[in-house]
Image: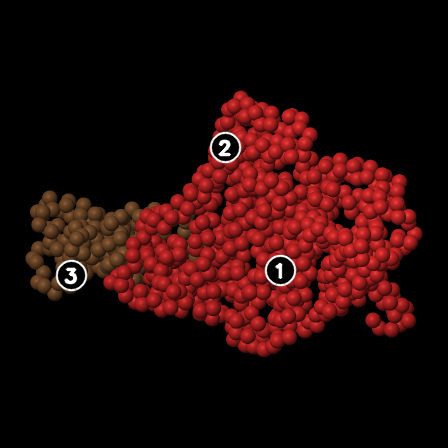
Amino acid sequence: MSAQSVDDALVAALARASVERAAPEELPLFRATSTAYFENPAALEQRRSRDEMLGFGVDAAVMLVTPVALAVAKDVIEFIGTQLRARAEKEGEGAIDRVLNRLLRRDEKEAASPEPAGVPELTDEQLEQVRALALEKAKQLKLSDAKAELLAESLVGSLATA
Amino acid sequence: MSGVGSTEPTESAAPPRPRLNPFVFPSETTFRFGLLVTAVLGASLYVWNWISTVVADPAEEVAEFRACFVLSPLVTGVTDVDEFSAASDAFTACLNAANRDVLWWMLGGTAGLVALTIAFVLAAPRWIERRRRLEPLTEEEAPAVRARLRELVREAGLDEEPRFLWNPLDQTATGLAYGYAGTYSVALTGGLVIRQIADPPAFDAVVRHELAHIRNRDVAITYATVALWYAFLVAAVAPFFLTLLDDGGDGLSNLSWRVVALAALVYGTRNSVLRSREVYADVRASAGEGRRGGLRRVLGSLRKPVGGVFARLRRLHPDPAVRLAALDDTRPLFRFSPLVAFGSGVAATIAYENVVTLVSFFVDDPIDMRFVAALAFAPFAVGIVGYGIWRATFAAVAEGGTGIPTVKIGLALAAGFLVGPELSLAQFIVTDDDALLASLLRGNDFPWGAALVLGLVLFSGWLGTVASYWARSLGDRRPQIPAFLTLLAGSAVLSAFMGVFYVARDTREAIDFSTKGSALQHAAVAETAWAGPVWLWQALLDPAFLVVAQRPFIPPALALLCAVPLAAVLVGGGRRDGVTDWAFLDPGGQLRPSRLGLDVVRPLAIGLGAGLAFWALLLVLRFSLHNGVSAETRATDAFLLSFYFWTLVLALAAQLAAGALAAFLSRNPNRLVDALAAGFVAGSLATLGIVGGPSVASCIDPIALNPAPCAWTVSASFSWDVFRQVVAQGALGSLAGGGLALGLRAWLDRRRADELSAAGVPG
């Protein structure tokens, strides 16, 4: 994780928090999966190669939550960044950093440390926008409806309790 | 886990039968690949032969060949035998030198195709790893997964652990074994690795399947098959079409459909190689996990493929239902489809002429060159058909049967042998008259077509007999080595058959010419002595027939035909029927081979009797001629030739009678084998009588044709010629006699049944 940029670390933290709730069985492989994802995020959406037909013969994809969670988290973080930048114009640049730091500390198990004063919260409306965005992205990545719902809820829950 | 079906094994009332072990015999994959390689290389030889003619300077070629023709003995007009021979050698050497460039083009182009194939195979692992974005699956990343993989490798019995790589972002739950010996690797997907946690049986099933590919040694074959296909397109089909663009018109259309047919054959064979290996990998994997492991559930979750026949031929994986069925009962894997025999026949003959062309650069004799070329194809054709028959026979014998019917297999193989040459690229430059199938469709060459079909039906029947005799005689002992050795013998027999058949047909015009000469010879002899009907004279003494009948490989082939089935008696004495772990994948299996009381003595004794009868008749004939024909007449060449002719007739009759009697009195399942064996023994003894007669008779005046006290000897080379002729022609005689006896016996059996039926006795 040390080699990751702050943005990647943030995405990984948010995705991990979501996976913990939506697909805890995938957690042992989360680190390896996220590393592969950040090396080439586009790989997730690329088509399978033909030589896979020489494999076992399973052509139905088993949708893993982790890669989808990472992709969704990336979009969500970008969305939140945009939202917070708008608020920063009113409340100052430090607001963004405070939110990001809070998310990062959560990932690093430092959530118990004292909360800095004046951290901006996401509004209910923004959280609903995040949920809709996550749901759409997860479905776009072919996650089943049930799992997409679960992932979106988990993600919003992670943000709401961050 | 999503994507995994919920098919659960159902409890049935009756316990399932133990599954027969399909790994007792080599899988078809290897032989199909071998046939694919020979067909592709043969086609490549033709393509590069063609290209060499396209790029060559016609004027230069004509000049070279003109220079050669000047050396021809027909042009130089030499009459002395030695000078004629020297001129002929010089002419042949000149032609070979002129054609040397063609040889290099053929070998060079084909070597290029092979090199490209090897390059593709070597590059495949890196290509796969790059395309699939694979990275090593490390202990640090997934310690539990690595630990389980080690256990599965140990369970699979692999000597060396393959590399395990993965792509965590790959959503599918699948694996892929790739590489070649020493560099085997298994690619896992993220979707599969997560199953090690969420659904361990499903993870185990897929990994076991991939490890089974390595254990079955079909991974390198798989990638070589795919590589061969692409190399064929790049290094043969593409340059061929490029050269054809200049030709245009009829040439292009005439050749295009043949290239398409050839490509379709290669493509279809490739796909069948890839499909057949999957079922064997499933079965191997299921042996590790038992009948109720995760593999069944994973296969049950696969989608049923859609589409018609063409879609099925394009598929690289078998229908999941077929894969599932093989887990329940492996017996369907032991069946042999006539369609496979047909494909083997096509593949074995489609490039045969091209290989003959190559061999012609090294072997002068036209029959020998065809025999050598056949050796390149026959082992693979026999490997597929022979092992198919062995496998099916083994399964039948295991359950108390005696064997399998082989007529359809023989007919399918013969159909393949008829269709294959039609698809050959070589047909582009020869007349349609040379293609047997086309000729048959025009109503010509029926005897040739009948000979081919009958020969291959009999050969398939012989393979079935061999498998049945040996499988039943072996009892609970493993059949691998006998199967291998008997099929090796079968390859030699098929090579001999192909060599003889194709050259005999090729020389049919020469036969027409030759028989005119032998008819004149018959007429000349008939002026001095009785020479019998002209057709019989020609059948036994025409040079065109003799040059085929006296091939040195025919007697060994005939000896194999007789000895290989009957030699099963040598292992029959020690058979034990009991529980056999090697023959079944599950415990509790029991082989139930039916007893085979093979009687070898009877046909050999009949042959011996017929041979001795020949000796007796020969003595009578010599005595009669000594006393009934004047010494002057007996001293003429015409009389001696006539006498030799009648000894051959007598030998043929002895073999025919031996074959008929042996078949009629036989107690063995295949009476024609007995007929052949009896005929072979009778022919061998008859040869001794023919070549030993002059020496013996010259010492015993009452049976001497010409007085020369103990002075006549017969050279070893002539004796060898006589032996080859007598047993080759006698084999046809003994088969004919055996066939007649079978017909008579069947007629008698039917009449007896009718009589019993009329008398009201239950049959």
Residue where numbered disc 1 is placed:
B389
Q: Measuring 61% from the left and 54% from the top, which residue is drawn there?
A: B492
User: Cα distance, mark 2 to mark 1?
Assistant: 44 Å
Residues at discs 3 and 2 in contact (Cβ within 8 Å): no
Q: Chain of mark 2?
A: B
State left or right for residue B364 relative to residue B172.
right
Q: Measuring 63% from the left and 41% from the top, which residue is drawn there?
A: B366
The colour with which the image depicts chain A is: brown
Question: Which residue is more in the foreground, A15 or B711?
Answer: B711
- In the image, the chain rendered in red is B
User: Cα distance, mark 3 to mark 2?
Assistant: 75 Å
Q: Chain of mark 3?
A: A
Pointer 3 and pointer 1 on the same chain: no
Question: Which residue is more in the foreground, B53 or B224?
Answer: B53
Residue where numbered disc 2 is placed:
B101
State left or right for residue B671 relative to residue B387.
right
Residue B442, horizontal then vertical, whole percent: 73, 37
Q: Amino acid at mark 3?
A: Glu
Residue B126, relative to residue B156: is it above or below? above
Residue where numbered disc 3 is placed:
A108
Q: Amino acid at mark 2?
A: Asp
Q: Measuring 48% from the left and 58% from the top, which residue is drawn there?
A: B278
Question: Which residue is more in the foreground, A103 or B436?
Answer: B436
